[in-house]
Image (cartoon, helix red, strand yellow):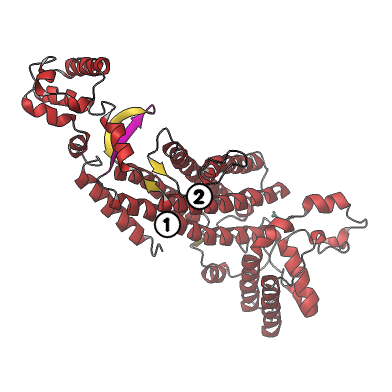
Amino acid sequence: MKGKKLWGGRFEQETATITEKISASVDFDKRLYRQDIHGSIVHAEMLRNIGVLNDEECRKIVNGLQEILKEIEENKFEFFHSLEDVHMNIEYALTQKIGEVGKKLHTARSRNDQVALDMRLYLREECALIRRLIAHVVHELVTKAETHLEIIMPAYTHLQVAQPVRFSHYLLAHAWALVRDIGRLEAAERASMVLPLGVGACAGVNYRNDREFLRKKLGFASISQNSMDTVSDRDYILDFLYFAAVLGMHLSRMAEELVLWSTSEFGFIRLSDSVTTGSSIMPQKRNPDVAELIRGKSGRLYGNLMSLLVTMKGLPLTYNRDMQEDKEPLFDSIDTVKMCLEGMKEMIATMEVNGGVMRNAVYSNYSTATDLADYLVKKGVPFREAHEIVGAIVKHCEREKKDFFSLTHSDLQMFSNAFDSDAVNLLDPMRSTENKVSAGGTALVEVEKQIRELKHILKSLGEVR
Ligand code: ARG
């Protein structure tokens, strides 16, 4: 449909096809239809309250909008490119449906405060959904941690075996990162809870409108204080995109480990068939595509943040059409994090844990060397000297092709007289984990404490399942 524009009054020539093409956002912003209609209904009620619309007019507008909502939901609504965006498509359809009175809806409102409203309402709903999905992943991690308390694995630094830890402790490490993500998500949500509607295009409107009514009806925490700032502000979207980028980074790091742990070389875990794919040429392959794609998708999440930061940079106050470019990055980040969280949940819930393989990795890699050095320190040997002594023991074992835990008391005594007979106990990785009793350590009591704390957090987030 090419033809008359809702803003066409002062124009003489037709809009060029390229102008329609470059301005049209309806293909992607039509997903705001529910928020747009909801906002318009409340706006109409406010206009009635302040005497701009009479009861009859308001009723017609509200009914018309509700019919449009139904049509869109039933896929019976036609969106036109020439009408640019979701807002003008709905407003146009309203007038087609109820006649002249439809043209009164846009009184005391601009698309600038309207679009800010729709985006804030939309983001708020998505934040709630995403918080649930994060809670699901945390829940899976906690559940796996609880059922695998006795499995130990190496903790790595520099991807070299460092010290023995409980597999549960490792899983919970990722859970805590996700809990911090929830904090960032909530910060973005809070930033979106400021009502923009009622400021008009940029300067305010020539009506004593009732923004407090709008705030209450639309469920905002507060009302924006400056009309120019209101239509220029996209910080809440940037906050969300930052949250999504950091979450993406966490998921990517988890995914990387799942890829690594499931290789035949590591073999710590086996990913379920449900989250792996085959190769079109190599019949033996089981590829961890879900994990790889989650790792890969962090790239677009970073890109979306950067994209909007750059779009906003240098824009003069107030609204500029550039800001229409906030939508695709936001929508893409929302869709991407939801997909990644679901994929991660599925992988964790269905993975097989090879406790024996993890155990071998801690037993054969001198992972208790630090415990042995600490033992010497307790016997009065200065730490640097103890470090040196244990280093020599490792060298000896490597030469003799021996594991640490096969050393006897007399073997140890060749290196230092400070070793009493109880020292051999420390060579056992399981014992080592039990000695990590500092707050937040990998000893059983400390891990159980974390599980309790995380369950408490999950409970405060509401129903997870
Ligand atoms: N589709 C536009 C956007 O997303 C709505 C606001 C248009 N305002 C304007 N003055 N052209 O930003």
**Helix, strand or loop at disc 2?**
helix
Question: What secondary structure predominates along the stretch shown in magenta?
Answer: strand
Report which residue position mark 2 lands on: 275
**Mark 1–mark 2 CB contact (< 8 Å):** no
344 displayed left or right of 99: left
Q: Which amino acid does label 2 sit on?
A: Val
Q: Which residue is drawn at 68% across and 48% down?
A: 325
| Residue 24 sits in quarter | bottom right
Task: Residue 37: give x, y in percent of width and height.
Answer: 65, 70
**Residue 319 seen anywhere in this rendered image of the structure:** no
Is residue 14 visible to us here? yes
Query: Residue 80, percent across and down?
Result: 80, 63
Instruction: Indicate whether 146 appears above or below 98.
Output: above
Label whose residue precedes the other's in the sequence (1 or 2):
1
Q: Does the magenta stretch include residue 456?
A: no
Q: Position of residue 386 (x, y in %)?
A: 17, 18
Residue 296 screen position, x and y as percent: 56, 40
Find ligand 1 in the image and state its quadrant.
bottom right
Count of labels in the image: 2
What segment carries the magenta color?
A: 151-159
Query: What is the spatial separation of the Cα atoms under label 1 and label 2, in whole angstroms?
Result: 17 Å
Magenta segment: does it hold 156?
Answer: yes
Quarter of image, res 32: bottom right
Residue extending farthest bottom? 56
What's the mark number on residue 136?
1
Amino acid at pointer 1: His
Work out whether 172 lies above or below 380. Answer: below
> Which of the image's four quarters has the C terminus?
bottom left
Residue in the picture at 38% in, 64% down: 462
In the picture, measured across the screen, residue 289 lies left or right of residue 420, that is right
Residue 361 badge: none
**Mark 1 falls on what kind of element?**
helix
